[in-house]
């Protein structure tokens, strides 16, 4: 019997040449084609794009062939394209959805298959179950040769950039950024973000220097294209070498972003989300709901109280964030992994737009990244975060799940536990407003232990307590 394919936190991901094969890509494409037909979306057509991972363009073509064979018009990107650009193309073309061949920040051995709805956002969990249910055995997959489909107009190759750039220009004034005279380092992490900042901001006083901007699917000098340490260390080493004012670090498909300050210090993704909230509320003077996963910063809750805007918390992943953003008309939405979405745009992580917004915040305030962080802390107080990712024997998963479910500590690292939240994994809220979260990854076979606290000296002890509660340390 064919092994069932399941969607995780964001799409289906697997190891190339093991579970991630051309036959399985075609099966998932057939499931999505059936779903689009069931939902009355097939007549609108579908966007298909890809990243720079091994064989990604060929997996994308395989998916496009299946969609075309099902009578669904395909707009196939003419090269590797950032995830937010693919998502915005759904809106620009008024398509019924999108397929994106990318494993985002996963290790080099993986590839992935993301799907998007007619608004360019992540498809909610209930509909993902319908797609999974529609995935057939390989014998039931329809297929049409790429050349034949292009000849008869069922597959059209296109450049997604012009529509996306026009959208960015509506969201942020690029001219002041071009003339700001910034010295910007961009770490492309060997991925889809290469060339975008020079294209958007070139020709003025601002200087853009890119590193790791070629295609290399083994992702040298990092374990994976995820914009957190140690993967960012090599890129950040260039900040002081070139005297950069800021480092912008996009992950492999450019939907996530990390930042380094003017000293080459990494700015963790919770602090960055706090800064993005500060930028919207204080610098731009906007108001509206904030949507956040439980795994990201409580600084947003404090900003919500200060500026009198509601804050909504969801499970981890944009399959929860995107629908909530649409439901409440959110000003901003985001997660712990460095993915941020903004009002007036598609409800999708956009690491390029977030990078432009950081530069805009610097230009409007005249502050450096470290000064901006201090301004945030002056409002909400310093917050400290860290995370441990642990691979484990999968035979122990049920045991670890039970350990976590049974955990009811009175205190953690000397801080009283005031509440337990079970939206996604198990989160222990502590007396300082900080938290410890234990949950299984939805994209990889690992368990994550995260924490945020106002006590810098307690971070390691809180994480150690989490590992012990899960039974991963004695």
Image: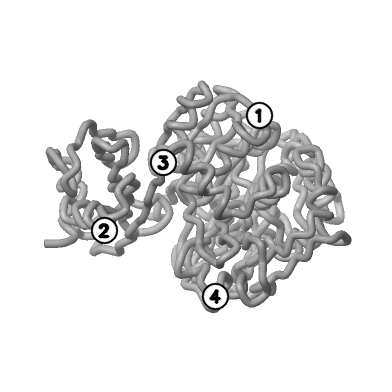
Q: Earlier in the sequence, mark 3 or mark 1?
A: 1
Identify the mark at residue 460; answer none if there is no mark: 2
Quadrant position of the C terminus in the picture = bottom left
Tag nearer the camera, 1 or 4: 1
Location of residue 368 in the rendering, given as x and y in whole percent from the top left corner: 62, 54
Contact (CB < 8 A) between labels 4 and 2?
A: no
| Residue on which disc 3 sits | 381
- Tell me the CA gap for discs 2 and 1: 37 Å
Q: Circle 1 sits in a helix, a strand or a loop, which is it?
A: loop
Q: Residues within 10 Å of mark 1 (few under 14, many from 20)?
A: few
Q: Earlier in the sequence, mark 3 or mark 2?
A: 3
Q: Mark 3 to mark 1: distance in Å? A: 21 Å
Q: Which residue is mark 1?
A: 285
The residue lying at 48 percent from left, 48 percent from top is 271
Q: Residue at x 19, y 45 (%)?
A: 404
SS for dot 4: helix
Would you place residue 29 above or below residue 474 in this image?
above
Q: Depth-wise, is mark 3 or mark 2 nearer the camera?
A: 3
| Vertical arrangement, residue 417 with respect to residue 201, above or below | above
Which residue is identified by label 4? 234
- Of labels 2 and 1, earlier in sequence is 1
């Amino acid at each position: 019997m064919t092994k069932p394919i399941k969607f995780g936190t964001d799409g289906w991901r697997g190891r190339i040449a093991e579970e991630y094969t051309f036959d399985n890509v075609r099966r998932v494409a057939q499931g999505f084609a059936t779903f689009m037909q069931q939902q009355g979306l097939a007549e609108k057509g579908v966007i298909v794009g890809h990243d720079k991972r091994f064989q990604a363009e060929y997996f994308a073509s395989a998916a496009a062939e299946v969609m075309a064979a099902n009578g669904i018009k395909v707009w196939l990107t003419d090269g590797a394209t950032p995830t937010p650009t693919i998502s915005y193309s759904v809106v620009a073309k008024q398509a019924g959805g999108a397929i994106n061949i990318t494993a985002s920040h996963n290790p080099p051995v993986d590839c992935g298959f993301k799907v998007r709805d007619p608004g360019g956002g992540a498809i909610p969990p209930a509909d993902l179950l319908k797609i999974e249910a529609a995935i057939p055995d390989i014998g039931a997959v329809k297929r049409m040769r790429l050349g034949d489909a292009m000849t008869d107009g069922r597959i059209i190759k296109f450049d997604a950039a012009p529509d996306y750039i026009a959208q960015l220009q509506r969201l942020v004034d690029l001219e002041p950024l071009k003339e700001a005279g910034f010295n910007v380092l961009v770490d492309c992490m060997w991925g889809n973000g290469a060339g975008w900042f020079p294209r958007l901001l070139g020709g003025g006083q601002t200087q853009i220097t890119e590193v790791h901007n070629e295609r290399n699917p083994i992702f040298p000098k990092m374990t994976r294209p995820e914009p957190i340490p140690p993967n960012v260390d090599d890129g950040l080493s260039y900040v002081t070498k070139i005297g950069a004012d800021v480092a912008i670090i996009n992950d492999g498909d450019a939907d996530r972003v990390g930042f380094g300050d003017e000293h080459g210090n990494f700015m963790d993704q919770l602090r960055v989300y706090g800064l993005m909230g500060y930028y919207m509320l204080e610098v731009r003077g906007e108001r509206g709901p904030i949507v956040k996963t439980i795994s990201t910063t409580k600084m947003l809750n404090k900003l919500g109280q200060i500026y009198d805007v509601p804050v909504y918390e969801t499970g981890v992943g944009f399959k929860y964030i995107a629908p909530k953003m649409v439901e409440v008309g959110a000003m901003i939405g985001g997660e712990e992994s460095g993915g941020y979405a903004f009002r007036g745009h598609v409800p999708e992580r956009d690491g390029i737009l977030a990078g432009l917004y950081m530069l805009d915040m610097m230009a409007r305030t005249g502050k450096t990244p470290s000064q901006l962080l201090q301004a945030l802390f002056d409002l909400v107080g310093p917050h400290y975060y860290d995370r441990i990712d642990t691979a484990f024997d999968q035979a122990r998963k049920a045991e670890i799940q039970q350990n976590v479910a049974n955990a009811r500590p009175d205190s953690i690292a000397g801080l009283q536990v005031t509440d337990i939240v079970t939206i996604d994994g198990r989160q222990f809220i502590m007396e300082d407003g900080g938290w410890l979260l234990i949950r299984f990854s939805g994209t990889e076979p690992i368990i994550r232990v995260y924490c945020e606290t106002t006590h810098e000296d307690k971070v390691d002890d809180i994480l150690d307590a989490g590992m012990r509660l899960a039974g991963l340390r004695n």
